[in-house]
Amino acid sequence: MEEFEYLSPVNLPQLLQFLSSPGGRVIAGGTDLIPKLRSGALHVSSLIDISHVEELRFIREDAEWVRIGARTTYADVLESPILARYAPVLLQATRLVASPMARARGTIGGNIGNASPAGDSMPPLLVLEAEATLINPTGQRVLPLEELVIGPMKTLLAPDEIIHHVSFRKPPASRGFSFEKLGPRQGMTISIATAAAAIELNASQTISAARIALGAVAPTPLRCKTAEELLLGREPVEETWKLAVEAALKNMSPIDDVRASQEYRRKATGVLLERVLQSAADLAKRSADQ
Amino acid sequence: MKPIQVNFMVNGKNHQIVTAPNRTLLSVLREDLKLTGTKEGCGVGECGACAVIMNGEPVNSCLVLVGQADGSTITTIEGLSKNGQPHPLQKAFVEHGAVQCGFCTPGMIIASKALLDKNPDPSDEQVREALAGNICRCAGYTKIVEAVQAAAEESNHE
Amino acid sequence: MSEKETLIGKSIPRADAWDKVTGSAKYVADIQTKDMKFGLVLRSTEHHALLRDLNTVTAKQIPGVIAIITMDDVEGSKYYGPINPDRPILAHDKVRFVGEPVAIIVAETLAAAGAARDAIQVTYETLEPVFDPIQALGPDAPPIHPDGNLLAHFEIEEGDLEKGFEEADLIVEQTFKVPRIYPGYLEPEASLAERHPDGHLTVWVSSQKPFNDREHICHVLGLPVEKVQVKVATIGGAFGGKEDSNLAVLAALAAWKTRCTVKLVNTREESLLAHPKRHPAILTYKAGVKKDGTLVAMKVSSHMDTGAYGSYGIAVSQLHTETLTGPYRIPNVRLDTYLVYTNSPISGAMRGFGAPQSNFGSEGMMDILAANLNMDPITFRQKNIWRSGDRNVTRALVNQPESLQKSLDLVKEEIKRLEQIPPAPGMRGGVGFAVSVQTMGLGHRVPDDSTNRLEWQPDGKILVRIGAPDLGQGLNTVAAQMTAEALGLPIHRVEVAELDSFVSPDGGVTCASRMTYSVGNSLLMASQKAIAVLVDAAAELLRVDPTNIQYQNGQLLRLDQPGLAPIPAAEITSRVAEAGKILSGEATFSFPYGPGTPDHLPLGMPHVKFCMGAQVARVEVDPRLGIVKVKEIVAIHDLGRVIHRVNVEGQIEGGVVMGVGFAVTEEMSLKADLHWVNNLTEYLLPTSMDAPPVIKSVLLEYPEESGPFGVKGIGEIPLVPTPAAIVSAVENAVGVRVTSAPIKREDLLAKIG
């Protein structure tokens, strides 16, 4: 591995101080960065290690909001009663990330900041309509999550800015969520297609709210607002889902690579989307019945 | 490159290391502490052979920069037996034929321990999920799952 | 005799297991000496190029660099190869694949070696590469080696093919493709070499063939055998991939030139690129049957891609040719295997050695023929499968083919059982099977000896100086077990020594499904000798005629004075040790090719001993995503005699999962950007969640009389029928017949209704 200056802030003020000098790259769990440093795909002059900045590792709730600190690991997510209650879809996705060892180290902030089109935390957070709070040495700003990631491995983060936390409004109890992932093998796998959906039904059992997000099939994770709008007022049945899939397919621009072809990614995403829409609707129906 | 000082506890013993920050925990464990039980199989966290327990959780030590381990408590395969008594997992792996070439074994046992520490009575499926990050090419996983279940049973009867 | 319980069949704990579960077992990369230096290999980044210039001036000046070694530094043989010596130790005028070694950098630290490697300037003149074996034989193909791209052609012709096809009521043709498979052992290749002041070399290896490594090292360095000591560390898996001496030779060269201790460890990426893999192949079958199901003719043309250098390709393609028709009676055949050079990474030995590739084709053909005849696939096979007295297409007599009929009967039962299991909601279930044959031994007229030695220790224990390495499969354990059984000793009184070429005899290469068989036979013979020398020594000490002494279970009985208490062996061995002597028995077992062995085929053919079996697969297919989940494999294998049940099951379970990988996830391919798949995120080994949750081993024992205790081989065959069984199950599930591996989801989706 090439040489770099190693900075290890012990708290948030010190982190912000390091961020104000140029050229630093933040490292959290390291599961994405370290292989790149090892292969020479990435060159850094200094690494700012946030491993010891405890202020960034939290899961909190208040009356309306749930907030997840950027340094929260996937393992933290899986153990959180707050997230189990308000964001089971995030746990669903987290359970399928890589391996237990990767989940002990990988962080939500890292996953978002790495901005891989196949990042598994994104589709669930998008259907939760999460926002990202970014901090820099002089202040902070809040962005809808889908505006933060702008391209493969590209975010709007300024060089002296990091994600502080992501937050989402606690969804209505009657809203059902679901997530599915497809990888080239069953265990410890990258995603070649992911789909997350949220469905809410009104008293007449038609769709009153819908959220759709897809991963690994475009330069960034996708919110499919056109498809969502198409669903409103319709019955939660197969024909309806097929409409959503048709609309969502128009947003997709999947790649061809050694793991899967473009064509297959399209087909597979369509199937996953139908399935998560149905599961989300079933959950919505069940909670309405309770 | 400016060296850094790192303090951590490994297998119950405190260590202070001064070294280059671009080294991994794996390399420090193997080369500086001579704990060669933890193996390098791929260097990128895709095989699990380098797994150790860090602050109670299984991690791939090839993906931990040494600075990131500062202040941590680490257990490697060498630290699993207590007072000369093997851990039930070590015993079970031997007794159930779960060890062939042995290269995946330390990481596999570490990941198994991490599972049983959290879930002392896992189903076969849960065992396989917990070991999905540890590749074995020799044994086909069947006897490994058996060994973990046997160790779980033994521990539950204590 | 004794009421001692037999050890044969007992799953005794492996002696090496404790060291492995505690982390104290030492693999080559774990060896650290005080003054150790680090070596890195500069490798070609071109597929096919002339090497115009190698500029090491800047690199040599980097602090910490000790030497940069190139072909100019090789004083002995500049080329080597396990069969045909076509491979340069280090590339000097041309490179033929990405990953080919060009230079070795030795430095005080790995970092310095890395910096130096980056500073070496290589000037390549790119040549057109070719990656497909059929294209490589075309008229416009770039020549990779001076004699052209066809390395070898093997043929078998029996009967009258044309007449056979005329007799046929139905003729079917099909082409099959099998992928480049990486052995995937967890321990990357590593070697450590030390040059001693007295001029001898010690080379630590992770290798299946330490004595061949020694030979190669001696040739390359121009040293006599007595100057090179090869020591075998704990090996982290091999599966054929460690039959190539490359890294051992490079480490030895580095140590020799620098007079230092040098360690070379491959990264996983280097291992994937530079070490031999399974031969990919394109097999074209044409078969003729009568309407009653009798096979009358078969023509097969197979193109095997041996990559840039031959490695074991010649031997692999021979075994491949011998197994192309499977375990079936076919009177008229014409088989051609073309072994072709391409600019792909080297293909060489890998578990199965050509048989997995042929099985994929032959079992696929059997299913297709049966379907075309509207005949049950089991019935079709029963009609044509080998029976007692039958010979292979090579005219070699088949041993215990009755096991095949038994296997088919068991297959029928298992299919019935598995078909009852409903698939998960939304999935389509299917059950399929395949039969298999694997050969044992290195082939006719290839020297195939195993010499092993037993030494009485002063305390009466026996030390097994085994001459062939344990790769992790448990060879040492069964060697001790068979020795203990032969000598009537409890297992804890038998120890196995580490392999050291200065001390150990040459037990042969660990490969070819014949280790328990050959090493076992050698040890049984050596046991008799060990007993004899012990008896003679006792006779001398006791001043009686040796005929008055009988050995029994570690003790010596006085036949002339039956009232005397038995004498423990230790009494004799300790006194002999005091006199500075060692009592030992050494024996060589030669793999048996009797006078009746057919001799009309080239050197290396035929193989004369066979292992056989069958597997049944239950799969579930997601009809909308094309995902194949293998839920259960039943592995039915005849191994003659089960020495160590748990070891055998371990071989089977591991082999089956390797077969699952071949069928469903594994392929080392050239990507669109002309880079090879070279990491474990793209080369997908089966994880615990990809392996079938149920693997049931059914062990048949049809004893092979030439085998110790009736043993046959099991090392390779467990992965042989798995892919074909899975393909057959997938067809049963979704009506799609797959003819190339790995099964591609898109291909399934395209054809599922």
Image: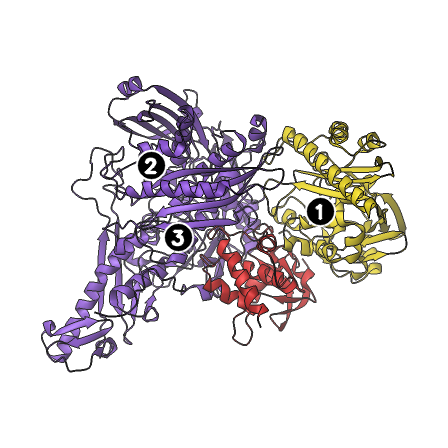
Residue B153, horizontal then vertical, whole percent: 56, 65
- Distance Cα–Cα, label 2 vs label 1: 49 Å
Tag 2, which chain?
A: C
- Distance Cα–Cα, label 3 vs label 1: 42 Å
Residue found 49% across the figure and 62% down from its top: B93
Q: Residues within 10 Å of mark 3 (few under 14, many from 20)?
A: many
- Which residue lies under the disc numbered 2? C314
- Which residue lies under the disc numbered 3? C207
Q: Is residue C412 left or right of residue C484?
A: right
Asked whether the viewer can see residue C144, the reply is: no
Image vertical order of residue B143 relative to residue C577, above or below: above
Tag 3, which chain?
A: C
Colour red belongs to chain: B
Looking at the picture, which amino acid does disc 3 mark?
Answer: Ser
Image quadrant in which you'd find residue C174 = top left
Element type at mark 1: helix
Residue A254, horizontal then vertical, whole percent: 69, 31
Residue C334 vs residue C538, the one in the foreground: C334
Looking at the picture, which amino acid does disc 2 mark?
Answer: Ile
